Image: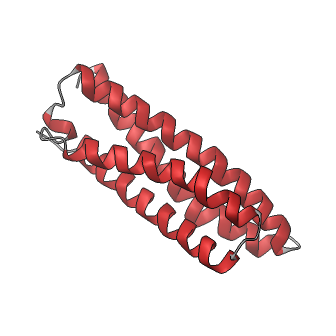
Amino acid sequence: MAWRERVAVLAAALWWGSLSAIGFLAVPLLFANLPTPALAGQTAARLFTAQSWVGLGCGVLLLLASHRRGESARMGGSGGALAFVLAGMLLALLGEFAVAPRIMARENLRLWHSVGSGMCLLQWGCALVVLLKATRRT
């Protein structure tokens, strides 16, 4: 496995793993263990901001790794994985700059929290597809 393919696998694993750890473990634990939902929400918002930047960084690494090697079979040759990389990055940007400010402002909280949760789940799915394609044996 060439170093570019290793970078792609590591970036995909970090992206999916960090989304999994934050979304399915850390944030639920915050709400279960912190004294108030407001404190848990503020802390979760910071984690999601950090996760957005991790996702964008991993996406950039994946784009750079696939660009130089002409989208090898590991990333889906036809550009399939790259579409999921771009979709995941777009979801991270929209979550951070369009949805999160509305949640923090408590603007129609139920709606925007549902939208944000759905976008996180979609980003998780995109990262999973990228990871599976990056680790596929040729």
Q: Quadrant of the C terminus?
A: top left
The correct choice, above or below, for 9 with respect to 132 in the image is above
Seen from the viewer's position, the closer of residues 129 and 137 is: 129
Residue extending farthest right: 35
Image coordinates of residue 87 in percent, x first then y, are 36, 50
Image coordinates of residue 57 in percent, x first then y, are 50, 34
Which residue is located at x 68 percent, y 52 percent? Answer: 47
Seen from the viewer's position, the closer of residues 25 and 121 is: 121
Image coordinates of residue 62 in percent, x first then y, are 35, 33
Side (left or right) of 21 relative to 2:
right
Which residue is located at x 34 percent, y 36 percent? Answer: 9
Residue 3: quadrant of the picture: top left
Q: Is residue 135 visible?
A: no
Residue 107: quadrant of the picture: bottom right
Which residue is located at x 64 percent, y 53 percent? Answer: 48
What's the image's color scheme?
secondary structure
Q: Is residue 31 visible?
A: yes
Image coordinates of residue 35 in percent, x first then y, are 89, 73
The correct choice, above or below, for 120 with respect to 11 in the image is below
**Number of callouts:** 0
Side (left or right) of 86 relative to 40:
left
Residue extending farthest bottom: 110
Residue 124: quadrant of the picture: bottom left
Q: Quadrant of the N terminus?
A: top left
